Image: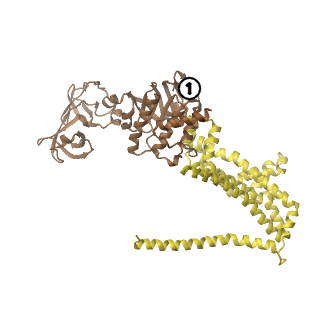
Amino acid sequence: MTSPTDGLYLRQAGIGRGFRTLVLGAVGAFFLIPILASARYSVLGNHHHLTLSAYRSLFEDPNFRSSLELSLQVAIATVLLTGLLVIPTSIWVSVRIPKLRALLDVLSIVPLGVPSVVVVLGILGAYHGILNLILTSPFILAPIYVVLALPYSYRTFDTAVRSLDINTLVEAAQSLGASWSRTLVGVLLPNLRAGMIGALILAGAYALGEFVVASLLSFNTFPVYIVQIGLTAAAEAVAVSLVALLVAFVPLSLVAIVGGGRTKRRGVLATG
Amino acid sequence: MPRVDLHLERLEKFYGSMHALDGFSLHVEAGELVVLLGPSGCGKTTALRSVAGLERLDGGRVIVGGIDITLQPTAKRNMGIVFQHYSLFPHLTAAQNIEFGLKIRRVGAPTRRRRAKELLELVGLSGLGDRFAHQLSGGQQQRVALARALAIEPSVLLLDEPLSALDAKVRISLREEIRRVQREVGIATIFVTHDQEEALAIADRIGVMRHGILEQLGSPAEIYAAPASEFVAEFVGKVNRIPGRATHKTTVESSGFGSFSVQSEVFVGTHYEVLVRPEHLGIRAEAQGSCRLVEMSFLGSSFAAHVQAPDGTRIVVSVSPEESVGLSVGEAVDIFQRGPTLLVLPQSGTRDPVVVPEFAGSE
């Protein structure tokens, strides 16, 4: 049965579909056109014929590899530190000292309001002289990135924590005899997996892309390398940006697929 | 399952300046179901949580089967708890939830699976072991939570308002189910609720709590028929408060509802308030009656007749359908007493009873 109102809905749905396509198309173009243009430029450059010379010179540049490796190492360290510090802290605070939550909420967004230059000056001032050894190691970047990424990592994870009745789950687990570590690994983390993966991805992505702190502390990370190349060789700079995009995209997609896949399997089991 | 008793000795707990448990003592026999009943903030949940070790006590001892466990952490206490909020682990199936405690105790997989199956059967959920929490109704989730609590063969079962999140129909059927399971398992149980009807329906004994102390402890019948205080009388069941003046050492004359014979001695000439249940009052149509029937509400098996005295005092009288014939709203009626009064209180000043009636068994 169709009534006049059904017709109206159908028409509206039609308009909605068209509008949706338009918006999606515009947004897609907004993101894709620069990437495609970059790709085209990186293989044509100013030579007006197809060449992979930009990529070749890039891969032959020893700085390319070393800076990429450095960034990946720092990113992995940042992810590990976030996983070991931020995630247990967030859980601990919401279970044991919920009063501190408001304070952590505020603290976690402070990095957004403090310019990176100030952060660097603060670190130099605080550690100058005492820990020269640490300051010269690039791994000093990891703890800094853990803090600077807090607005993204902590917030993401905290949202997941809040969506769970974490106190009741903890008490239930303890009453059944579970130790703290068992409760964490066997009950909380499986239910917080999505939030945890999100937080770790954001921390890693932040570490991969951070420029100012690394540059000011004179570490040749990948973003610093991109900027340096960009000053001297245009085609190579574009090529390296595309490589950077892949470097970020591939692991993130992998994590998302692995994480999402598990959820889907559970969903299938759940309905079966 | 080990049949042990639970003994709570002078428990003390402060939240800041609030005295949540004020020398609270209770003994629960093996296999007995004691309901802790009271309004929110009376300390009933605190008492239950301190038995579980989820609340640290400021004083007193918790003794299970003769062993002092006051200082043991929750994980070592072997207590089965069903929480008010849904507490199933969302990433595990119902059966896996039930097996959780056994897994921690390193029970082998075949035994675990058999236990889970038995317990699902016990709580009436055979065949639903593969479901996740989000695929179960609220009542089913609480059944699984009960099975999970019983799986570890706990020494004591603690139920913290397990039915309060459920709708009325499920609540009634599940409370009967809980009672059946508890009898079958034969385990000392504390059940916390603020619902007096629930308490009366399932308890072996009810402990009515106020301000962190046990106001009265007794069988449901005792609590209902012989409340020890005004608070208990008001909290359990419905009660009318009728003001009047003592005209004889066992008679209080009210201003509009006639005279009441009370079970305890009163001082002639003093003003009192008589507490009496609606079903212990009767009503009859009487053209010369001093009261007026202002409202009749149908409750299914009976009517609640609202009656007003000339001075404006209103009371409720329970009327059977047969008795309701011939009564009409707006007409003059008379009230008569057909059962014992609960308490007689001095009308002003202190609200504590000076005279405690002793009529247990007088009915």
Image quadrant of residue A168? Answer: top right
Considering every residue shown, the one lying at the far top of the view is: B66
Residue B294 or B266: which is nearer the viewer?
B294
Q: Report the side of A132 relative to A176 (left or right).
A: right
Return the x and y of residue A32 as percentages of the image width and height: 69, 70
Badge 1 density bin: few <14, some 14–19, many ≥20, Cα 10 Å: some
Image quadrant of residue B229? Answer: top left
Residue at x-position 48% and y-position 31%: B21
Residue B170 or B55: which is nearer the viewer?
B170
Image quadrant of residue B77? Answer: top right
Q: Report the side of A194 relative to B173 (left or right).
A: right
- Apparent colour of chain A: yellow
Query: Relative to A226, does residue A120 appear above or below in the rendering?
Result: above
Q: Report the side of B321 relative to A70 (left or right).
A: left
Q: Is residue B212 visible?
A: no
Query: Relative to A117, does residue A193 appear above or below in the rendering?
Result: above
For disc 1, the marked residue is B69
Return the x and y of residue B73 as percentages of the image width and height: 59, 31
Considering every residue shown, the one lying at the far bottom of the view is: A48
| SS at circle 1 | loop
Residue A134 or B170: which is nearer the viewer?
B170
Q: Report the side of B298 relative to A157 (left or right).
A: left
Letter of the chain that mark 1 sits on in the rendering: B
Q: Count the labels in the image.
A: 1
- Apparent colour of chain B: brown
Return the x and y of residue A235 as percentages of the image width and height: 82, 71
**Mark 1 is on which residue type?**
Ile
Q: Is residue B214 visible?
A: yes
Return the x and y of residue A211 as percentages of the image width and height: 77, 60
Residue B17 or A248: which is nearer the viewer?
A248
| Quadrant (top left/top right/bottom left/bottom right) for the N terminus of chain A | bottom left
Q: How is the image coloured?
A: by chain
